[in-house]
């Protein structure tokens, strides 16, 4: 299937993708759009002009600053709307293709629009579900012989994070300040973090509530998941080391996280499902999952110093997870915790088996002992001021590429 | 100052209090009200009828299911509105007092209305700021000689919690299920938590945003704090023990927390300010606070088995904190983390120096080794199915009592 909208080779957004996002233009307020090739299709106007009849859509559902209201309509409707959009964009369909006046109203070039946060994040959980990452961290900070803690293979370890500071790609932020304590001193010091790091993650967004007290089975999860984004879980390693006992990471994470602006639907990813690793020891019944719930998504991380070229410093894959999204959400709700429309659940750092596929500077530079060489000749142990970190991801099979675009952000110096 | 509305002796809600909440009736939708004696004053109708002119209030600001829009008007306005409400209720003011028809429209008995969640909780942090509680837990689970971890006196330890499952007083909930592991076994088991506990806490609610990257000083915090509620941070101790390393409590906390429905303003508590304990070692400059930021609020916890009388099992006081709310919010934002209108920040378990003032069953029964005797003859190590936990709090000075009402909730058996 092809679209009458031109889709350049290697575009992340062919007609098979149709990811949802929020955009605005210099003259138009925030609204829902989908990406097609290098363009954005304005669903607010498309609906106003009668192209999306038959779904009983609320009149203003696309004139919104977040996708939450649209997602809350439920998968039956949102999936049908996505199918209808593909129909409108299909190369042989003249409905919109042959109406130049209308096309000029509803199709924007992506470089003309400004992407916004796609969802209002209601609750945010960060998991810790890549075995290689957990082993790397455990080896560095605890005991190489017992790198995984006893609970790790029995449950998808996770913690609640800060929703307010999740930002859309492109939003610069300041290096965080905070308390750190050197091993050789008794007292902590205050100042800008010196060990700023990224974490390569993906995150899914929920589109349905459950009742407090009810638990989801792994087989029910797909009805609750709208789609995925790329996620950069910025981490201040020196703040984290001092603050995190006994209640977990706090200010080391809450200063900023970034996501890619286009939410790629679970349906668009269906063709890229695969089995995960065999889980041994056997998991408890509520965590068992019969289907294929891992995804073959190629991931890469680039580091670009100011006014220099970008170096790809990591190439990983979303398939390198131990726990999958169905297990994560079943676990999240097994105690009766209620889900909301707009919750975000991040995977945890996605590190593959090879050192070149590790998903953080901490691991890539092995705690700063093996500096990373950049194309321009500089080295990095951690992220420096004015560096930009760019993460990209796509799945590809039989000539069809379903991509996530990118999540990028530049680090500004700490505020005075 | 007195009100023409009758205020019974020992009422939590004299004219000096005027706490804000959300209520509905069998025939009226959710709206903003204030408590006065045994009554609720309907601000939505009061405003509609012209009693709150001069503040430039949006027309529908009190016809809302949450206080967030009202709080977001800012302290200058919300404080002036509260002063105006006290003026209307003052015993010598005939404006409303002498209009029986109007009174019938705007005054409801509290037992006629149903209280709702007062705020939409945007972000939720739980601190760990009572030294006695941290010492008790450290003594039980780690080392009595080194009960406090090295960071504890240098920063107000806290973690992000789950916002979706914060419930208003009176909402029953089910005992959570989850993974636990006994010391003598290798494998975890799945089932209802057997060590369900409460935690006696208070929480403050923010009413103002700051920009991402900006930090609040302790002297700025009061402009960001709307008021306080009682907070019951339910905890499943057996789930917590197995899951919490290395990233902190997760499902052990996220199944339910309860708050009292009336938000007592910071201004109402001004008369009860006091100095906190001397902090030694000296804290870093960003945590220094010149003013009196502790509050003398008497707290108690009752346990009521089904169809039996209530036993008061703890009497504590909010003054038994090491870190105060100004230090907590300055710490939360020192890394540039942005605050939202409607964030909730809980104190952590408030345990006083005496065993009778401990703020959790874990401490009161000393990990189950010293069962608590109840009036009806039963004993408790932890909370049982059908038990109701009730927390109450009030400040009192020179004949004026500013109370919080209560937060109560009954535990239902785990769902099948």
Image (cartoon, coloured by chain):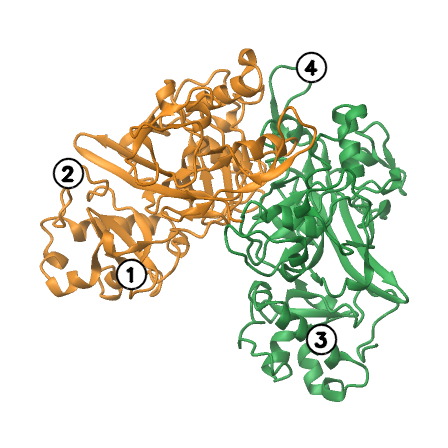
Chain colours: A green, B orange
**Residue at figure coordinates x 66%, y 70% from the top left:** A33
Q: Nearer the viewer, mark 2 or mark 4?
A: 2
Determine if marks 4 and 1 fall on one subunit.
no
Q: What is the quadrant of the C terminus of chain A in the image? A: top right
Q: What is the quadrant of the N terminus of chain A in the image? A: bottom right
**Left or right of residue A217: residue A9:** right
Q: Give the alpha-carbon distance from disc 1 to disc 2, as whole Å.
A: 26 Å
- Residue B141 location, quadrant: top right
Chain-order first, disc 4 or disc 3: 3
Residue closest to the eye, B323 or B258: B258
Q: Which class describes the residues within 10 Å of circle 3: few (<14), some (14-19), or many (20+)?
A: some
Chain-order first, disc 1 or disc 2: 2
Q: Nearer the viewer, mark 4 or mark 3?
A: 3
**Residue at figure coordinates x 70%, y 51% from the top left:** A325
Residue B394: x %, y % from top left: 28, 34
- Parent chain of label 3: A
Check residue B99 in the rendering and tell me which mark sits there, or answer none: none
Q: Which class describes the residues within 10 Å of circle 2: few (<14), some (14-19), or many (20+)?
A: few
Determine if marks 3 and 2 fall on one subunit.
no
Check residue A184 in the rendering and tell me which mark sits there, or answer none: 4
Q: Determine contact: label 2, label 4, CB under 8 Å.
A: no
Check residue B25 in the rendering and tell me which mark sits there, or answer none: 1
Q: Which residue is mark 3?
A: A83
Q: Which residue is mark 2?
A: B9
Q: Which class describes the residues within 10 Å of circle 4: few (<14), some (14-19), or many (20+)?
A: few
Residue A174: x %, y % from top left: 64, 42
- Parent chain of label 2: B
Q: Give the alpha-carbon distance from disc 3 to disc 1, as whole Å.
A: 44 Å
- Parent chain of label 1: B
Q: Which class describes the residues within 10 Å of circle 1: few (<14), some (14-19), or many (20+)?
A: some
């Amino acid at each position: 299937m092809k679209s009458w909208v031109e889709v350049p080779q290697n575009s992340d957004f062919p007609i098979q993708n149709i990811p949802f996002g929020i955009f605005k233009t210099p003259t138009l307020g925030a609204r829902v759009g989908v990406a097609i090739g290098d363009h954005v299709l304005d669903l607010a106007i498309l609906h106003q002009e009668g192209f999306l009849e038959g779904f009983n859509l609320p009149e203003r559902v696309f004139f919104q600053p977040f996708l939450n209201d649209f997602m809350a309509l439920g998968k039956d409707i949102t999936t049908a709307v996505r199918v209808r959009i593909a129909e409108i964009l299909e190369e042989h369909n003249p409905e919109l293709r042959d109406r130049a006046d209308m096309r000029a109203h509803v199709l924007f070039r992506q470089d003309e629009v400004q992407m916004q946060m796609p969802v209002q994040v209601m609750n945010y959980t960060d998991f810790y579900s890549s075995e290689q990452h957990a082993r790397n961290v455990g080896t560095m900070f605890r005991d190489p012989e017992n790198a995984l803690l006893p609970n790790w293979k029995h449950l998808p370890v996770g913690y609640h994070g800060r929703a307010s500071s999740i930002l859309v790609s492109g939003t610069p932020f300041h290096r965080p300040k905070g308390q750190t304590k050197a091993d050789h001193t008794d007292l902590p010091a205050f100042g800008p973090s010196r060990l700023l790091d990224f974490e390569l993650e993906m995150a899914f967004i929920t589109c349905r509530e459950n009742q407090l007290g009810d638990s989801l089975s792994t087989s029910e999860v797909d009805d609750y998941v709208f789609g995925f984004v790329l996620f950069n879980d910025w981490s201040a390693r020196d703040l984290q080391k001092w603050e995190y006992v006994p209640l977990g990471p706090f200010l080391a994470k809450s200063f900023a996280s970034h996501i890619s602006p286009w939410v790629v639907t679970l349906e668009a990813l269906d063709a890229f499902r695969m089995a995960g690793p065999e889980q041994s020891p056997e998991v408890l019944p509520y965590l068992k999952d019969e289907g294929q719930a891992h995804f073959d998504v190629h991931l890469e991380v680039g580091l670009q110093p100011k006014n220099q070229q970008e170096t790809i410093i990591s190439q990983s894959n979303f398939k390198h997870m131990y726990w999958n999204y169905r297990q994560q959400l079943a676990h999240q709700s097994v105690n009766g915790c209620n889900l909301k429309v707009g919750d975000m659940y991040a995977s945890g750092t996605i590190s593959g088996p090879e050192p070149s596929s590790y998903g953080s500077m901490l691991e890539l530079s092995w705690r700063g002992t093996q500096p990373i060489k950049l194309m321009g000749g500089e080295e990095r142990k951690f992220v420096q001021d004015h560096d930009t970190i760019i993460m990209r991801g796509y799945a590809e099979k039989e000539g069809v590429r379903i991509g996530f675009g990118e999540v990028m952000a530049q680090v500004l110096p700490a505020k005075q």
